[in-house]
Amino acid sequence: MKHLELARKYFESFGRPLIEQGFPQLKDRYAAGLVGEGSGCFGFDDDYSQDHDFAPGFCIWLTDEDFDKYGAELQKAYDFLPVEFEGFSKNNIIDASRLGVMRISDFYASFTGCPDVPETTMDWFLISETNLSVVTNGEVFEDKLGEFTRIRNAYKAGYPKDVLLKKLAARACVISQAGQYNYQRCLKRSEKVAAALAASRFAESVMSMVYLLNSKPAPFYKWIYRGFKELPSSDEMQKIADDLKVILTTAPSAENILRIEAVTSTLINMLINAEGLEFAGYYMQDYAPQLMEKIQDPELKLLHPMADCQ
């Protein structure tokens, strides 16, 4: 059983009756679901994931006003829900703060720094892709009031255009620096550890750029390749995924230099088509100036091309 399925079943069996019968004043004012940290929220969980935090439970999100009035009492009632369900135990929970009753504003602020939809371009820029993926994953089981979903939908729409351009420029620089430049220099010096680190940095930046071009935030590094394979499929995407797998799972080599160039060439074409850039050669960093030039926000435009909050 997947964690999202377990959470939904537990909510429908015990959570919905608890709230809508025990707290009728909240019947049309609460949101519930499973969103946040952990492989289960991304749907990436498997049998190995069940060793910790895989347990019956769900989140209940309330407005500040409702939390102040009913939060403590509702949390107490939540804590008394059955410990065992579908063969799983709440005693397996290590981080209880991920579940139970919480303010909508606290949930979003804890990951994005903003209790609501970010108000400025810089507020958006300061949100990492990882944290943006955390507040947009999982499932919302109920939200008649719509407040939690209103904010969630704004985050699911992705970064504003200027922030997207700035992040793409930063990725372009790292892809060139780590992959096209430093990887082969490390090999020439027989610095295999440094070459492996360069390959990892290159691959993560490549995948991040593809996620951004698909208006989807890249998740935590452990799941970035897993999620990458679930992005819209194409022959180009499959070739990138295959080459990255070889680059990351084999010893640094001259053959991998060719794979890095092949990945970069394909990605340059994707970037040109997506952002309407002029062809500037096969060195990815040469596209950063065009991306920076398209940025309208003066504060972002003044930042170094490589500056970012990943």
Image (cartoon, helix red, strand yellow):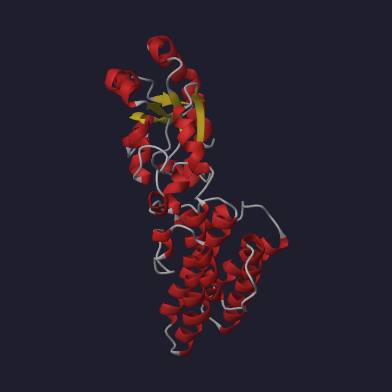
- The N terminus: image quadrant: top right
203 lies above or below 155: below
57 lies above or below 20: below
Q: Nearer the viewer, residue 24 or 43?
A: 24
Question: At 47% across and 77% down in the image, what residue appears?
Answer: 177
Which residue, as the protein is rendered here, is positioned at the far right? 235
Question: At 39% across and 66% down in the image, what residue appears?
Answer: 303
Q: Quarter-wise, where is residue 226 in the image?
A: bottom right
233 lies above or below 67: below
Residue 120: image location, x then y, percent: 40, 48
Using the rendered image of the protein, determine whether residue 137 is visible from the camera's viewpoint: no
On the picture, is 274 further left or further right than 81?
right
Q: Quarter-wise, where is residue 192 in the image?
A: bottom left
Question: At 41% across and 10% down in the image, what residue appears?
Answer: 24
Tally of marks? 0
Residue 85: image location, x then y, percent: 45, 25
Question: At 69% across and 64% down in the image, what residue appears?
Answer: 236
Which residue, as the protein is rendered here, is positioned at the far bottom? 188
- The C terminus: image quadrant: bottom left
Q: Nearer the viewer, residue 44 or 169?
A: 169
127 lies above or below 238: above
Using the rendered image of the protein, determine whether residue 69 is visible from the camera's viewpoint: yes
Residue 291: image location, x then y, percent: 53, 66
Residue 153: image location, x then y, percent: 51, 37
Q: Nearer the viewer, residue 119 or 149?
A: 119
